[in-house]
Amino acid sequence: MQTTKSGQAALLALAASAILSFIDNFVAAVSEEAGLWQFQLFRAAFALPLLIVAARLMGKSLKVVRFGRIAMRSIVVSIGLLIYFASLGALPVSQAGAGLFSSPLWVALLSVILFRQQIGRIMTFAVVLGFAGALMLLQPDVTNLTLLSVMPLAAGLFYGLGMMLTRHWCADESAMSLAIGIFLTIGIVSLVMLFWVTAHPGSTFMSAPWAMPTTRFLWLTLLQAVGAVFAVTLIAQAYRIGNPTMVSVFEYSFLIFASIWAFVLWGATTDALAWVGIIVIVASGILMAQSEKRTSDAATSL
């Protein structure tokens, strides 16, 4: 029975990664229709009712245990995701995703800095390996570093910090409450920022003012919202029935799916160094997951 549940959890995690990487490939198309803040505002407006309905149908509680803590967690994770989506306006999904999936590396480093935890040699090696893989995939021009060069890694930093807050502050909160908190926060921030950029317009994805929504924009945004809700539901179920360590490893398939979808949808190819980077990041994730599992098992046996 446990083997069957593990297999189901793995398939759910793979499906969630495939859906997320698919819909994220269309953010560049969204950027041709409207700016980041308008996109995120409409995305949140579409997603929130869907999440509430999904929670009711699945019998999931939406009760918030500690409002202040879930609010802080929502703000931190939302910053990471907004930076990630801003990156998608100019970078391929696999490159922006490499930064977001550097979050376990930041979690390990923050655990040492903030909580004085000892991470061991294997975890240290995995952190270095994962960072090297992220650089292989991002391939920054060290002679001409720009804000865009470091944005994906900044997304990973905030997302990783958010995952730490999830573990230490929000362990008693339901997965649906956490998801709703993020979409609600993103919606509020996007509304405020949309007013700002409309009053002070620019020409980039992040600074584009309000534009009359086109049919294409609405359909692309609805696709994003529906896909995100499906993916959140699938990954929540995967973590519910499967081993969290194993599920987290399968989430790294996002980077592989992102490259595959980019080729299928747009004919965009991924070079050899980037593929090596993907393999290195996945290997790093497996090492970190196994190291964390051994640490957890050792603590349980005491």
Image: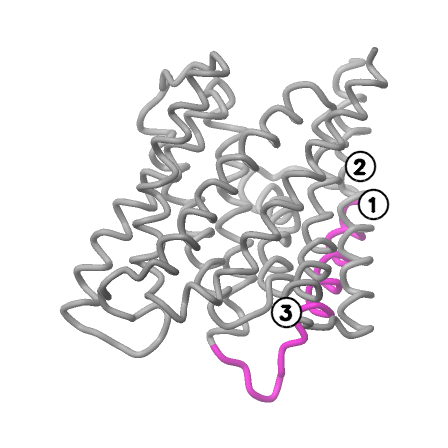
Q: Which residue is disc 1 drawn over?
A: 122
Q: Are marks 3 and 2 in contact (CB under 8 Å)?
A: no
Characterize the magenta stretch by its predominant secondary structure.
helix
Kindly state the secondary structure of the residue where label 2 is placed. Answer: helix
Kindly state the secondary structure of the residue where label 3 is placed. Answer: helix
Q: Looking at the image, which residue sits at the far bottom?
A: 143
- Is residue 131 found inside the magenta-colored segment of the image? yes
Q: Position of residue 158 (x, y in %)?
A: 48, 50
Label 3 Cα crowd, 10 Å radius (few <14 / some 14-19 / many 20+) = few
Q: Which residue is disc 2 drawn over?
A: 291
Which sits earlier in the primary sequence, circle 3 or circle 2? Answer: 3
Kind of residue at badge 2 = Ser
Kindly state the secondary structure of the residue where label 1 is placed. Answer: helix
Task: Identify the image quadrant of the N terminus.
Answer: top right
Front residue of this view, candidates 289 and 240: 240
Label 1 Cα crowd, 10 Å radius (few <14 / some 14-19 / many 20+) = some
Front residue of this view, candidates 299 and 265: 265
Q: Which residue is disc 3 drawn over?
A: 266
Q: Which quadrant of the view contains residue 163? A: top right
Examine the rendered structure and indicate whether residue 166 appears above or below residue 6. below
- Report, in whole angstroms, how far the alpha carbon at label 2 lies from the one at label 1: 7 Å
Q: Which residues are magenta?
A: 121-146
Q: Are marks 2 and 1 in contact (CB under 8 Å)?
A: yes
Indicate left or right for 224 with 199 as reference. right
Q: Nearer the viewer, mark 3 or mark 2?
A: 3
Question: How many numbered badges does the structure rendering display?
Answer: 3
